[in-house]
Amino acid sequence: MSQGRSPILELNQITKAFGGVEALRGVDFALHAGEIHGLVGENGAGKSTLMKIIAGVHPEFSGRFMLDGKETRFRSTRDAHAAGIGMVHQELSVAPDLTVAENVFLGNQPTNRLGFVQWRRMAREAGEQLARFGIDVDPMTRLGDLPIGLQQLIEIARVLFSGARIIILDEPTSALSPPEVERLFATLHKLRNEGTSIVFISHFIEDILRVSDVVTVFRNGRKIAETASADTTKGALIEAMIGRGGEALEHSYTDDLMLPQAGAGSAVLKVDQLSLGRTLQDVSFEARAGEVLGIYGFMGCGQLELSRILFGKLKPDGGTLAVDGAAKTFRSTAAARRAGVALVPESRRAMLFHQEPVYKNISISILDRISALLLKPVRERAIAQRQVEQLQIRPPMVGLDLGMLSGGNQQKVALAKWLTYPPRLLVLCEPTRGMDVGAKNDVINIVRDLRAKGLAIIVLSTEPETVLSLADRILVLKRGAVVREFAGEAVSKDRLLEAA
Amino acid sequence: MASSDSATAPADHKRPRGLASFLRSQMRNIAPFLTLIFLSAFFAIASPSFATIDNVGNILTQVSVTGIIAVGLTFVILCAEIDLSIASIANVTGIAVAYFTLQESYVNIANVPMPGIVAILLALALCALLGLVNALGLTLIGIPSFIMTLAMMQIAAGVSALLVRGQIAYKVPDLITTLGSGSIGGIPWIVIVAAVMLLGGHLVLTYTRFGRYVYMVGGNREAAEFAGLNVKLILGSVMVISAVCSGIGGMLGVAHFGSAQQNEFDTYLLDSIAAVVVGGTSLFGGRGGIGNTIVGLFVLGVLNNGLDHVNIDSFLKILIRGLILLAALIINVYAQRLREQAAD
C-alpha cells in the first residue's frame, strides 16, 4: 500500500557503533504514511538500535536521516517528540506514584492561562482516551496500584494518543494478555487508517504478520529483507532472521502435548499455604528433583512475588517453605543461596553487572566456595572459561565487560553463575523472554541438562510457549492462587490460556 | 546446540578496544592524575619554595589525617553510600582518648584516667559503636546514609561537647603521641600510619573477597542481592570501617595538633569527601579505589600547600578550593557517562 508515494521517514546507510562494536551497518529504512511496518530479527540484530536512532535516543550515528524529504538530525528525544515521533520502549517506563491521568499526559498536562494544571479537564480527557482504547479505570487512581499489564497498556495509550504521527512500539505485547493484544491491534489498525505510521517490533512473528503491512528482517546489524506481509510466511521470516531452516525450531504448541507421568524424584521444595497481601493466596506446591515445574499465569498473577519469596527477597505474610524437608525462613537472599536455592530473575539489568567483566559476573555467586579470604583470580577465570565454553557464550572472552555482549549471551551468563556448584532448586523467571529462536533453544537444552543432573527446576513465565517448551508439570496461577495443575496429561496453549 | 552464529553479538570478531575508547573508559583515572601534574608544575614554577624536599614532607604530613579518614570513606563511596559523620566521629574519638588519659592539673575536665592501652581500646570501641549505629540505621531501619550520618554527625558532636564541656585537653596516651607527632629516621610516624592504612585498604579492596563484594554491591546493588550476597552485611561493614578509620584519624590528629577540643576536625569532612571524589572514585559506586583516593589526597594537598606558597588572598583560597571541587564533580559524573557509553 506504500508503492509510488514518497516515504515520510527515510534513512540511508545508517551505521552505529557502541564502543567499537557495530550494532548497525549501512542500513536503509523507509516508512510511509498510513503504514504499519513490522521489524523482526534476533537479539542484537539492530532493530531496537535503529528505532532508538529514530526516536532521538542515540543522537550520534553516521548516515542520512530524512524526515518529510528534509535532512534532519535529532539531538535528543525532545527533538524527536517535537517532530511527532513517539516511542514505547521495551521496558516499562511509567511514573507509578502519579495518577493514571498524570501518566497519560506526562509532560504536557493541560494548563490554564496562569500555568496551573487543569485537573478536571485532564482527568476527563484521560478517561476518554483510555475508553477509546477499551481501558476502563478511574483516571485519578495511582498508576502503581494497577496490574503491570494494565500499566503497560496505559503507557502505550499515552504514546498512541499523544498526536504523534510516527509511533514506534518495541515489544509491546510481551506483558499483555490475549484480549489486551486484540484491543491493541484494533487500535493500531484504526490509527493506521487515520494516516499514522507505526513501527512494530516483536518476537511474536504471528503478531507481526497479523498486524503489519510490511515486514523488514534484520540480521547481525544489517537489513536482510523487506517484503509485504501478505507475501511471506512465518517459516520464511524465521529463515531470513537466522539464516537457516527455522521451521523445526519454533514450535507453535497449538497441538496437544503429552506431559510425562510423575517421576520418582523426591520433593526438594515444599511450599504450603503461602500468602502475601492481596498478591498470593494459599499457594501450595512441590518441586521435585529431576523435574521442571512450570508456573504459568498472566502478568500480575503473583509469579514475580512468588519467585522473590522462594529466594528470600520478599517475606511472606503466612505459610511455610521447606527445602529437602527442613523448614526455612529466609532472612536474606544469602540465606536462600546457602540453602541451595538459586534464582534467575526476569530482568537482565537486575541481575548482572554490566560494567564488570564476564568472569566476575559468573564467579560472584560462588566466591565463598572458591576463596576464604583472598581472591583467586586464576581459578575464577578458569571456572568462567569452562562455563563460557559449555554454554557457548559469544564472544568467548571472559575478560570482556558484560555490557559488550548481546542480550541472549547475557542471559546465558546469568544462568552460568549458578552452574559451577549446581543448586538444589533453580528458579527461572522468564528464562527465554525477548530471546531469538537459536538462543531460546540453547537455554532449553541447558535446562534439560540440569534436569538430567537431578536439579529441581521451577520455570515461571507469562508466555505459554516458554512453559510448554520446558515443563514436565504445569501449575496455572491466577490472581495469586493456583487454579489448575497439569500433570501426566495432555496440555496445549489453548488449554493453558483457558485455565488462566 | 547448533546456534553458534545465532547467539552471536556484533562484538564477535571485533575487539572493542580502540585507544580512544580505552582513554574514554579510563578518564576517571587519567583526569585526576593530569590535574595533579598540572598543579604541581604550576606551583613549582610560581614559587621557588614549593618544589623542595622539605615541602614535599610538609605536604605528606598535611594530608595524613585526611588520608587515614579517607581510607574508610573510599569503601563507603564505592558502595554508593556516603558518610557525613566522619569528621564528627574523628573528633569524638580524639576527645575520648584524651578523656581516658590523666590530664595536667590545670585542665578542668572531669575525666576518667585509664592505662594508655585501655584508653585507646575504649576510644576505638566508641567509634566502632557509632559506626555500628550508622550501619543499623542504614540497613535494618532503612534510613538513607546521607540522613543517617547527618544525624550521627550531630550525635557525635554532642558526645564530644559533653565530654570536654568547652575545655581543651592536651594529654593522650604515649603510643598515640608518638604515632601522631613523633618521627622515625626523619619520617613522621603519622605519614607511615597513613601509608600503611592506605596500603591495607588497597589490599583489602583489590585482593579479598570482601573487597570484590564492595565493588559489586556498588556496581549494581540489586544484582548483588540476586547473586545471593548479604548486601546489608556488606553495607553495614563499610559504615563500621569508615567510623573506625575516622576514629584512628581523630586520635592521631589530636596528638598531631597537640590538643583535643570541640569542632577541631570540621574541615576534614569536606577534605575527605573531596579527596575521594577528586581522585575519581565514582559517586555512583563500583568504580575507583584507594589508588584514586591517593591521587585525590595529593591534588588537595598540593593545592592547599601551594596556595600558601604563592602570594594569594587567603580568603580567595576557599573559593578556589570550591571551584576545584566542582570541576572534579563534573569530571566524575562525565567520566561515568563516557564509560556507560563505551559499555552500552
Image (spheres, rainbow, N blue to C red):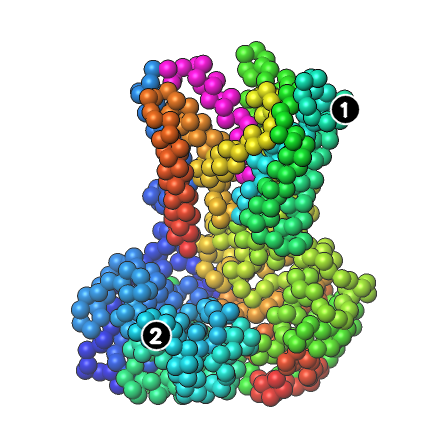
Quarter of the figure that contains the N terminus of chain B: bottom right
Amino acid, disc 1: Met
Q: For label 1, count other residues whose C-alpha is less than 10 Å away and answer few (under 14), some (14-19) or many (20+).
A: some
Of helix, strand and loop, which one carries label 1?
loop
Give how far apart the Cα atoms at labels 1 and 2 are.
71 Å
Quarter of the figure that contains the C terminus of chain B: bottom left
Residue A470 picture location, percent across and down: 61, 73
Tell which residue pokes out farthest to the top in this image.
B185
- Main SS of the magenta part reads helix
* Residue located beneath label 2 in the image: A111
Q: Which of A450 and B87 is in front in this view?
A: B87
Residue B209 picture location, percent across and down: 63, 42
Amino acid, disc 2: Thr
The image quadrant of residue A475 is bottom right
Range covered by the magenta-colored residues: B49-75
Residue at the (36%, 28%) spot, across then down: B39
